[in-house]
Image (tube, helix red, strand yellow):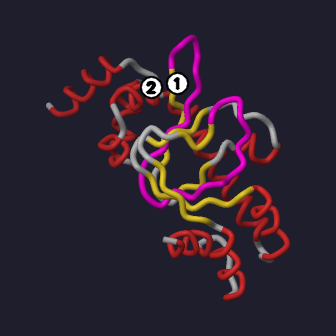
Amino acid sequence: MKTILINTISEKINLSKDEIKILHSSFQTVTKNKNEYLVNEGNKSTYLYFLTKGYIRFFYNEDGNEITTQIYTEKSFITSFESFIKNNLSKENIQCISDCTLLRISKNQYENLYKEISDWSIFCESVYQDYIMKTAERVNSLQNFSASNRYLNLLQNQPNITLNTPVKHLASYLGIKPQSLSRIRKEVIK
Protein backbone atom coordinates (compact mmCIF):
# COMPACT_ATOMS: atom_id res chain seq x y z
CA MET A 1 0.00 0.00 0.00
CA LYS A 2 2.80 2.41 0.81
CA THR A 3 4.31 1.48 -2.55
CA ILE A 4 1.44 3.36 -4.24
CA LEU A 5 2.30 6.44 -2.17
CA ILE A 6 6.03 6.19 -2.95
CA ASN A 7 5.31 5.72 -6.67
CA THR A 8 2.96 8.72 -6.69
CA ILE A 9 5.53 10.92 -4.97
CA SER A 10 8.28 9.59 -7.25
CA GLU A 11 6.32 10.79 -10.27
CA LYS A 12 7.03 14.35 -9.10
CA ILE A 13 10.43 14.16 -7.37
CA ASN A 14 13.43 11.85 -7.09
CA LEU A 15 13.71 10.00 -3.79
CA SER A 16 16.79 8.42 -2.27
CA LYS A 17 16.56 5.07 -0.46
CA ASP A 18 16.85 6.90 2.87
CA GLU A 19 14.05 9.29 1.91
CA ILE A 20 11.83 6.35 0.96
CA LYS A 21 12.47 4.84 4.41
CA ILE A 22 11.55 8.18 6.02
CA LEU A 23 8.27 8.28 4.08
CA HIS A 24 7.47 4.68 5.05
CA SER A 25 7.91 5.50 8.72
CA SER A 26 6.06 8.86 8.52
CA PHE A 27 2.79 7.61 7.02
CA GLN A 28 0.42 5.41 9.01
CA THR A 29 -2.20 3.11 7.46
CA VAL A 30 -5.79 3.72 8.58
CA THR A 31 -9.12 2.29 7.51
CA LYS A 32 -12.40 4.18 7.67
CA ASN A 33 -15.92 2.90 7.25
CA LYS A 34 -18.50 4.23 4.83
CA ASN A 35 -20.01 7.49 6.17
CA GLU A 36 -17.13 8.03 8.62
CA TYR A 37 -15.65 11.54 8.71
CA LEU A 38 -11.99 12.49 8.29
CA VAL A 39 -12.68 16.14 9.14
CA ASN A 40 -15.74 17.88 10.54
CA GLU A 41 -16.63 21.46 9.74
CA GLY A 42 -15.54 23.69 12.63
CA ASN A 43 -12.64 21.40 13.67
CA LYS A 44 -8.98 21.57 12.69
CA SER A 45 -7.61 19.30 10.00
CA THR A 46 -4.57 17.71 11.68
CA TYR A 47 -3.71 15.05 9.08
CA LEU A 48 -2.87 14.89 5.42
CA TYR A 49 -4.34 11.71 3.91
CA PHE A 50 -3.44 9.71 0.83
CA LEU A 51 -6.39 7.66 -0.42
CA THR A 52 -5.38 4.18 -1.58
CA LYS A 53 -8.85 2.63 -1.80
CA GLY A 54 -12.34 4.08 -1.79
CA TYR A 55 -14.23 7.32 -2.42
CA ILE A 56 -14.37 10.50 -0.35
CA ARG A 57 -16.45 13.64 -0.67
CA PHE A 58 -16.00 17.20 0.56
CA PHE A 59 -19.17 19.05 1.50
CA TYR A 60 -20.55 21.92 3.51
CA ASN A 61 -23.99 22.61 4.96
CA GLU A 62 -26.14 25.41 3.61
CA ASP A 63 -29.61 25.97 5.04
CA GLY A 64 -29.87 22.33 6.08
CA ASN A 65 -28.68 21.01 2.71
CA GLU A 66 -25.39 19.23 2.14
CA ILE A 67 -23.53 20.69 -0.85
CA THR A 68 -20.90 18.30 -2.23
CA THR A 69 -17.96 20.29 -3.59
CA GLN A 70 -15.44 17.57 -4.46
CA ILE A 71 -15.30 13.80 -4.86
CA TYR A 72 -11.94 12.06 -4.63
CA THR A 73 -10.78 8.63 -5.68
CA GLU A 74 -7.63 6.58 -5.23
CA LYS A 75 -4.19 8.19 -5.42
CA SER A 76 -5.48 11.54 -4.09
CA PHE A 77 -4.04 13.65 -1.29
CA ILE A 78 -6.87 14.77 0.96
CA THR A 79 -7.25 17.28 3.75
CA SER A 80 -8.99 20.55 4.40
CA PHE A 81 -5.98 22.37 2.97
CA GLU A 82 -6.75 25.81 4.41
CA SER A 83 -7.19 24.31 7.87
CA PHE A 84 -4.17 22.01 7.59
CA ILE A 85 -1.77 24.67 6.29
CA LYS A 86 -2.97 27.71 8.26
CA ASN A 87 -4.12 25.84 11.39
CA ASN A 88 -7.63 27.32 10.95
CA LEU A 89 -10.94 25.65 11.64
CA SER A 90 -12.21 23.70 8.64
CA LYS A 91 -15.03 25.21 6.61
CA GLU A 92 -15.90 21.83 5.14
CA ASN A 93 -16.63 18.24 6.05
CA ILE A 94 -14.67 15.35 4.59
CA GLN A 95 -16.59 12.08 4.57
CA CYS A 96 -15.96 8.57 3.27
CA ILE A 97 -18.69 7.55 0.83
CA SER A 98 -17.37 3.99 0.78
CA ASP A 99 -15.12 1.95 3.02
CA CYS A 100 -11.68 3.53 2.61
CA THR A 101 -8.05 2.66 3.15
CA LEU A 102 -5.75 5.61 3.59
CA LEU A 103 -2.25 6.57 4.60
CA ARG A 104 -2.00 9.57 6.88
CA ILE A 105 0.68 11.85 8.20
CA SER A 106 0.32 14.28 11.10
CA LYS A 107 0.98 17.99 10.67
CA ASN A 108 4.20 17.74 12.74
CA GLN A 109 5.54 14.77 10.75
CA TYR A 110 4.58 16.51 7.51
CA GLU A 111 6.53 19.63 8.50
CA ASN A 112 9.54 17.50 9.47
CA LEU A 113 9.67 16.13 5.92
CA TYR A 114 10.73 19.58 4.71
CA LYS A 115 13.97 19.01 6.64
CA GLU A 116 14.37 15.32 5.83
CA ILE A 117 13.48 15.09 2.11
CA SER A 118 15.42 17.40 -0.17
CA ASP A 119 12.65 18.06 -2.72
CA TRP A 120 9.67 17.82 -0.39
CA SER A 121 8.72 21.48 -0.99
CA ILE A 122 8.64 20.84 -4.76
CA PHE A 123 6.38 17.85 -4.24
CA CYS A 124 4.04 19.77 -1.92
CA GLU A 125 3.82 22.61 -4.42
CA SER A 126 2.67 20.11 -7.06
CA VAL A 127 -0.03 18.78 -4.69
CA TYR A 128 -1.28 22.33 -4.04
CA GLN A 129 -1.26 23.07 -7.78
CA ASP A 130 -3.30 19.92 -8.46
CA TYR A 131 -5.79 20.95 -5.77
CA ILE A 132 -6.10 24.46 -7.23
CA MET A 133 -6.54 23.11 -10.77
CA LYS A 134 -9.21 20.63 -9.66
CA THR A 135 -11.07 23.44 -7.88
CA ALA A 136 -10.77 25.76 -10.89
CA GLU A 137 -12.01 23.01 -13.25
CA ARG A 138 -15.01 22.44 -11.01
CA VAL A 139 -15.91 26.15 -10.89
CA ASN A 140 -15.50 26.41 -14.67
CA SER A 141 -17.73 23.38 -15.18
CA LEU A 142 -20.48 24.75 -12.93
CA GLN A 143 -20.37 28.16 -14.59
CA ASN A 144 -20.04 27.18 -18.23
CA PHE A 145 -21.63 23.79 -18.86
CA SER A 146 -25.15 22.47 -18.72
CA ALA A 147 -26.02 19.79 -16.18
CA SER A 148 -26.09 17.19 -18.97
CA ASN A 149 -22.64 18.19 -20.18
CA ARG A 150 -21.26 18.15 -16.62
CA TYR A 151 -22.56 14.60 -16.19
CA LEU A 152 -21.26 13.45 -19.59
CA ASN A 153 -17.84 14.97 -18.85
CA LEU A 154 -17.68 13.18 -15.50
CA LEU A 155 -18.88 9.95 -17.12
CA GLN A 156 -16.18 10.21 -19.78
CA ASN A 157 -13.28 11.29 -17.52
CA GLN A 158 -14.09 9.58 -14.22
CA PRO A 159 -16.72 6.88 -14.80
CA ASN A 160 -15.80 5.18 -11.51
CA ILE A 161 -17.16 8.20 -9.62
CA THR A 162 -20.52 7.96 -11.39
CA LEU A 163 -20.73 4.25 -10.56
CA ASN A 164 -19.61 4.42 -6.91
CA THR A 165 -21.14 7.63 -5.56
CA PRO A 166 -24.66 7.72 -4.09
CA VAL A 167 -27.10 9.58 -6.37
CA LYS A 168 -27.82 12.35 -3.85
CA HIS A 169 -24.09 13.16 -3.47
CA LEU A 170 -23.43 12.90 -7.20
CA ALA A 171 -26.39 15.18 -7.99
CA SER A 172 -25.19 17.72 -5.42
CA TYR A 173 -21.67 17.58 -6.89
CA LEU A 174 -23.12 18.26 -10.35
CA GLY A 175 -25.21 21.14 -8.97
CA ILE A 176 -28.58 19.54 -9.72
CA LYS A 177 -31.45 17.76 -7.98
CA PRO A 178 -31.44 13.92 -7.80
CA GLN A 179 -34.56 13.83 -10.03
CA SER A 180 -32.72 15.82 -12.71
CA LEU A 181 -29.78 13.42 -12.53
CA SER A 182 -32.16 10.47 -13.02
CA ARG A 183 -33.63 12.18 -16.10
CA ILE A 184 -30.17 12.92 -17.51
CA ARG A 185 -29.07 9.32 -16.96
CA LYS A 186 -32.16 8.04 -18.81
CA GLU A 187 -31.40 10.38 -21.74
CA VAL A 188 -27.77 9.18 -21.87
CA ILE A 189 -28.87 5.51 -21.98
CA LYS A 190 -31.18 6.10 -25.00
Q: Answer yes or no: do the residues labelled 1 and 2 have beta carbons within 8 Å? A: yes
Residue 31, percent from left and from top: 48, 56
Rendered-image quadrant of the C terminus: top left
Which circle marks residue 184 in the picture? none
Q: Residue at x 82, y 43 (%)?
A: 86
Residue 187, percent from left and from top: 21, 26
Q: Residue at x 65, y 81 (%)?
A: 20
Left or right placement of residue 156 versus residue 57 in this view: left
Q: Residue pushed farthest bottom?
A: 17
Q: Secondary structure at mark 1?
A: strand
Q: Secondary structure at mark 2?
A: helix
Report the front residue among 37 and 117.
37
Residue that numbered label 1 is attached to: 67
Residue 119, percent from left and from top: 77, 73
CA gap, disc 1 to disc 2?
Answer: 6 Å
> Are there few (<14), some (14-19), or many (20+) residues within 10 Å of tag 1?
many
Report the front residue among 135 and 124.
124
Q: Residue at x 54, y 55 (%)?
A: 76
Examine the structure image and report whether residue 41 is included in the region drawn in magenta: yes
The type of residue carrying mark 2 is Ser
Vertical position of residue 122 compared to residue 72: above or below = below
Report the front residue among 175 and 137.
175
Which numbered disc flags the more N-terminal residue, 1 or 2?
1
Examine the structure image and report whether residue 49 is included in the region drawn in magenta: yes
Q: Residue pushed farthest left?
A: 190
The type of residue carrying mark 1 is Ile
Q: Residue at x 59, y 26 (%)?
A: 60
Which circle marks residue 172 in the picture? 2
Q: Which residues are magenta?
A: 40-65
Vertical position of residue 178 compared to residue 48: above or below = above
Left or right placement of residue 90 versus residue 174 in this view: right
